[in-house]
Amino acid sequence: MNAPNTQHLASALQKASDALGQAADALRNEPGVGVPGRTGTPAELLTGRQLGAIHAIGRRAGLSRDDLAHLVVDLTGKSDLTRLSKAEASQVIDRLNEMAA
């Protein structure tokens, strides 16, 4: 490669790097960024313990995965457990506990 092409490529790479940096800075303020398909800030999303409890109590209540998924949609309107807020997860857990009793 000759020097002018190298300089041109270096300049283009620098511009691309700058643009990506600006995009990353802008996205850092967006809820759920960095986790595909997730919305809300980490503080708002259900915890791992809540997710585990939903699955465990659902099994104890005798629900299949499909039944559990339908229950979650009916209660929250969301089809993906990982998109539940802490409050929604608590609502699901409370309902599952009622069903398992």
Image: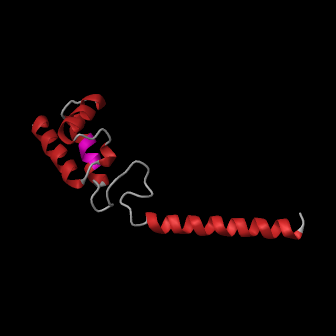
Q: Describe residue 14's horizontal placement relative to residue 95 as left or right.
A: right
Q: Nearer the viewer, residue 83 or 11?
A: 11
- Kindly indicate the quadrant of the structure image that contains residue 97: top left
Boundaries of the magenta span: 51-55
**Quarter holding residue 40:** bottom left
Horizontal and vertical percent position of residue 35: 43, 54
**Residue placed most toward the observer, 100 or 4:** 4
Image point 18% across, 39% down: which residue?
75
How many discs appear?
A: 0
Residue 22 sits above or below residue 96 on the image: below
Residue lying furthest right in this view? 2
Q: Is residue 18 left or right of residue 7?
A: left
Q: Look at the magenta stretch and give its main secondary structure.
A: helix
The verdict on residue 76 being magenta is no
On-image quarter of the N terminus:
bottom right
Q: Residue 8: percent from the left, percent from the top?
A: 78, 67
Answer left or right for 71 relative to 45: left
Q: Indicate how the structure is coloured in the image.
A: secondary structure
The answer to whether 70 is drawn above or below residue 29 in the figure is above
- Coordinates of residue 57 in the picture (x, y in percent): 21, 40
Residue depicted at x 33% and y 60%: 42
Q: Is residue 55 above or below residue 42?
A: above
Q: Whole-percent x and y of residue 27?
A: 44, 63
At 16% from the left edge and 47% from the top edge, which residue is drawn? 91
Quadrant of the rendering where the C terminus is positioned:
top left
